[in-house]
Amino acid sequence: MSQEYSIRRLTSLSNVSAEDWNHLTDNSNPFVRHEYLYGLEKYDCLTSQGWTPCHLTVYSGNNLTGAIPLYLRNNSYGEFVFDWAWADAYERAGGKYYPKLVTAIPFAPVIGPRLLVHSEAPAYIKIKQLLIENVLKLVEDNGLSSYHCLFTDNADQTIFNENNLLARSTCQFHWHNNNYCDFNDFLDSLTSKKRKQIKRERRKVENDGIEIEILLGNEITNKQWQAYYHFYCTTFYTRWGNPRLTLEFFMSLSETMPENTLLILAKYQKTYIAGAFLMRGDDILYGRHWGCSSQFPFLHFELCYYQAINYCIKNNIQKLDAGVQGEHKLSRGFQPYSSSSYHWIQHVGFRNAIADYLVTEKKEVAQHIENLNLHLPFK
């Protein structure tokens, strides 16, 4: 390693300032900002769920020049790139798959930068290389099974390929704003059948007497956060078990990231009954969590899709990221998209077996996306 740089390991983001950390990014992606990642840590969303922070940073003297969010994991919950079968096979063969190292946004399958280096840094590529080298050294020195970098953007992929990490594809669903004037303009781009379907679904919500409120972070009151959190927890307990995020974390976003935080709430007879939580980047709106206390037909589609699409159109946001899974999104104007993750398996034999598997899986994902594209609702 060059004497010009030093590597420091952080067990807490409290050890670096938000200003220094955020300087490494262009702030277009809210999930890699210090306020979001440190909020998860500060408000008890991580260690109880098996995410132990161990971020790596690169310094030039006392200046932070690079960083990679990094977590030691004792399970695979909240990652959305499913490696349960890998873990099972590894341990059936006598190995210990956990703990492993992961670079990801906890509980959020969102594409974004993972190797954080300011785009104008004079040694941009060198700093990225130092980060990867030291992540893999951390795996080796601690006898860990593997390292996984999830949902990375295109800017990171070259450096991962050059360091022989294994690429894996996942299917996501995104809605694209094709310079629509309004929601009806978007509907006009759809086939008659799909257009009528969406109109019928929205009309049902309106006829049921549902009122919609759209609130930015600094407009959300504690009472509204509490109402939403009840919906969020209710849905989690019903479907997945214990909620991942805390009320204190959600409420902190109103103060630390008000311009990025969006809450869409539904009222029935003056009482809140459902809500959707989203995060806003520069040109992408990210749909994250939904919950409800009363079941109304099509209310989920109205809050999570139609209201979000309408918000994108009104605010000139180019994309709505609805995350992984859910072929039902196709008929609402979302399109399948291949996203990439990268993996390093320490055991050479197991790495080779995974590499062979990923060749087949990549073809299957590509074929799946091709098949989905045959069912798009556009004219």
Image: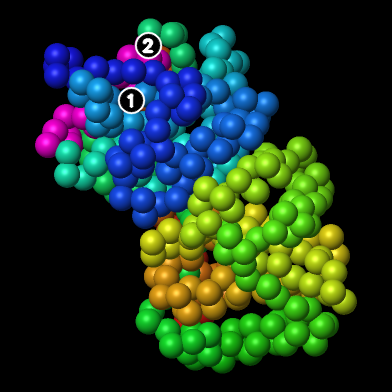
* Amino acid type, mark 1: Thr
Residue 48 place in picture, x, y as percent: 67, 26
Q: Residue at x 56, y 9 (%)?
A: 94
In the rendering, which numbered label is found on residue 57?
1
Tell me: residue 44, above or below residue 204: above
Give the labeled residue for mark 2: 140
Q: Dot 1 surroundings within 10 Å: few (below 14), some, or many (20 or more)?
A: many
Quadrant of the drawing holding the N terminus: top left
Any magenta on residue 207?
no
Give residue 304's mark. Answer: none
Say whether residue 314 is left or right of residue 152. Answer: right
Query: The C terminus lies in which quarter of the figure?
Result: bottom left
Q: In the displayed structure, does residue 12 sit left or right of residue 356?
A: right
Foreground disc of the pair 2, 1: 1
- Residue 216 in picture, x, y percent from top left: 57, 64
Q: Residues within 10 Å of mark 2 (few under 14, many from 20)?
A: few
Q: Which residues are magenta?
A: 122-140
Residue 324 in view in this figure: no
User: Which element is circle 2 on?
Assistant: helix
Which quadrant of the view contains residue 195?
A: bottom right
To which quarter of the image does residue 57 belong? top left
332 or 109, nearer to the observer: 109
Residue for point 44% across, 8% down: 143
**What's the image's color scheme?**
rainbow
The answer to whether residue 23 is above or below residue 310 is: above
Residue 232, position in %: x, y? Answer: 74, 52
Name the kind of residue labelled 2 in the image. Glu
Asked if 357 appears above or below 56 in the picture, the reply is below
Quick check: 247 left or right of 117? right
Residue at 57% across, 31% down: 41
Q: Residue at x 60, y 46 (%)?
A: 252
In this rendering, position of residue 153 left or right of residue 234: left
